[in-house]
Amino acid sequence: MRNHRLEDMPPDGSPPLELDAFVGRAAELAGLARALDAGRLVTVTGTGGVGKSRLAARAAARWARRDGAAEDPSVRVRPRAWGKVDLAPVRDPEFVGYAVVEALGLTDHTTRLPRETLLAHLADRELLLVLDGVEHLVDACAALVVDLLGRAPGLRVLAVGRRPLSVAGERLFPLAPLGVDEAAELLRVRAGQQGVTPRDEEEVRELCRRLDGIPLAIELAAGRLGVLSPGQLLRRLDDRFRLLTGGGRSALPRHRTLRTAIGWSHELCTPEERLLWARLSVFAGSFDLEAAEYVCGGGLPVDEVLDVLSALLGQSVVSREETPAGLRYRMLDTVRAYGAAWLEATGDAARVRRLHRDWYLGLATWCELEWFSPRQREVAARVEAELPNLRGALEHGLADPQEAHLGQYLAGSLWFLWVGCGRLSEGRHWLEQATRPRAGRPAHELPRLKALWVLGYVAVLQGDTVPARAALQECRREAERTANATALAYAEHRTGCLALVTDDMARAETLLRSALERYHETGELNSNVLMGQVELAMARAFQGDLAEAVRLCEDVYRVCEDHGERWTRSYAQYVLAYAAWSNGDPVRARELLTECLGGSHGFRDLLASVLSVELLALVTVTEGDAVEAAVLQGAAERMWPSVGLRLFGSAHYNAPHELCEATARERLGDERYEECVREGSRLGREEAVARALRRPGSRDGGLPAPRRPVEPPEASARTAKPAASPTRKGGETAG
């Protein structure tokens, strides 16, 4: 099951639609509800496959629909929020915080640790956080939960795992297997019309007793009812129990029963099905058919993988799911672990893992090329779905010093994921590992140079100027030493970004022009190159040359239209909107900003989004609606902490904000202005974007827009410091 962000939840707090019915567990749901009312940390424990995850998700959804008082259908109550974090694909304890941030839909481009981001977000919210699959990350989860519960009074945590967290205040909710009646009902529901008749009732009940009422085992059995009758299943199960346990059927421990049930299903598979099951275990999270065909070949013809995969689907070993990236497949963690043990036993694990790494190296290469194309949104959806597998490939690529260049190449090639899709913090983590000096590292300079300039870029956008400058300087030195013209151009370009967001416009212009010339000489053309031109346009606009800024961005706009590029185009729209407003055309400015905000929000590009909201506030006050302008400023104020230092600490970026605030305060008075700002600061990101995209009506006569760029106030220009924390595209939107 994928992570469920808060914005994924329907407005009534109900869970996403389930593909199959939730059967039984009425008493357990009621008991878990009481436990959640009584304590802030509840942990559902039980053997693998007993149904902990589904029970927790259903209980969380019910909790969210209740108002804490007597339920009255006639009373309309705003549902409480809940979010689910699937920790099964997370292997490194260091990524627990990142997984929670991601599941809650938080985009943070600063250098803050994920825990700090969570504390800032949860401080004044009421939320039930479901942590599913904590058993392999108990220490990391326990530390995070203790910290969050201690500092976020409105937070409750529902943990799910085979082991408790063992922290003070934890209430344990052990989940037992299903009773015979419920287990039999589950078997009938899952089997559907596949051969279960009233005359099979006695054998169905005996089958459920022998499987100890473990839902996973029952679902595996139901997957066989299209081929075997309940009686045949029972007889085969009898044989398998004796084979795998040496008799003593009545005294099987439940955890051994589960393994037996999975092993029994495994024994019923053909040799080809067992082989594919084992090899599929290398995938983290979900995977698609093409990846399975590439990674799992060898002794299994590629043209047979689909047929064998279909057989595993029919047996409930593999499940399928529809995603924005298309049809994908996954295995339950327990089933995957069983397959992984068999893969190790075959002695083929190292080869399959290399194939997995190579597939995702190829995927990253394809995605980087296709990012500069009409398939940009498809690429964004694809890398989002593949993130657990990409992490696994990065781990594998960076683990061996002799092959570290492959990890460097992968970390650098994913720049569009780190920068364009809202994952700066995670990108920084991998890029720092990739560029760390390694003993015995072979001389593969090209991948390392790329990782260095991408690291510098990410650090610039996070506002971490010292390491940004160090990485870019090292990249430049090595590029000059090895005569690498492309790496030199990127190092110069990103150093120009740093100058732009720290108000050194003359240096920014010099570096950006030089980088663009180098790109032209080497024939480089992609989103990065166009972004450099947008950034140059911003530098010219801030220096008063609006005509040149417009010319540069209109050229970018045309190239983006020719190539179907949307991400860089949104930044060109931002600059064109700034110029349109400065030239007295707020109508055109709003049109451009509306499209810019819609596009950037779709990419999870928080920097472009918040800059658009800031400029929309100024357009709105120009149109005469000071109230709405103040609300939008409040909404932007809430977004900035997840981006970095507000408006980069830049006098040039801050000038429109100050003009909007001064105008709104004058029209509303200080008290009313602050009230409107507070109203905006209560809007979540989705609400803020939706409100900004809704064109308000004019409430007063409107103001004439200026016919020149907004000059930063003299005091601000003199005292402004270099951006201590620009953020995620600081350089780029500085474009």
Image (tube, rainbow, N blue to C red):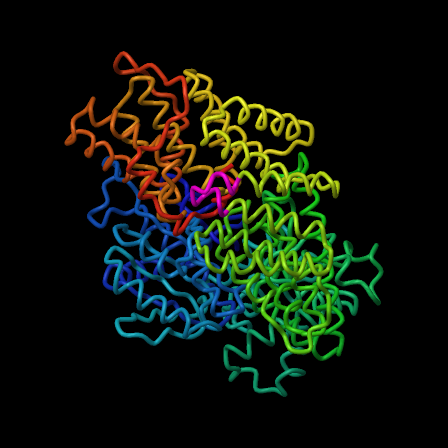
In the picture shown, does residue 635 fall above or below 42? above
Q: Where is residue 57 in the image (x, y as percent from the top left)?
A: 42, 55
Q: Where is residue 434 in the image (x, y as percent from the top left)?
A: 61, 65
In the picture shown, does residue 482 fall above or below 15? below
Residue 158 vs residue 199: left or right? left
Q: Which of 195 and 713 is in front in this view?
A: 713
Q: For the point 60% across and 76% down, which residue is it?
A: 260
Q: Where is residue 203 in the image (x, y as percent from the top left)?
A: 58, 66
Q: Main secondary structure of the magenta part?
A: helix
Looking at the rendering, the stretch of residues picked out in magenta corresponds to 498-508
Residue 455 vs residue 563: left or right? left
Q: Quadrant of residue 651?
A: top left
Q: Nearer the viewer, residue 75 or 99?
A: 99
Q: Which of 288 and 108 is in front in this view?
A: 108
Q: Is residue 526 visible?
A: yes
In the picture shown, does residue 157 fall above or below 7? below
Q: Quadrant of residue 225?
A: bottom right
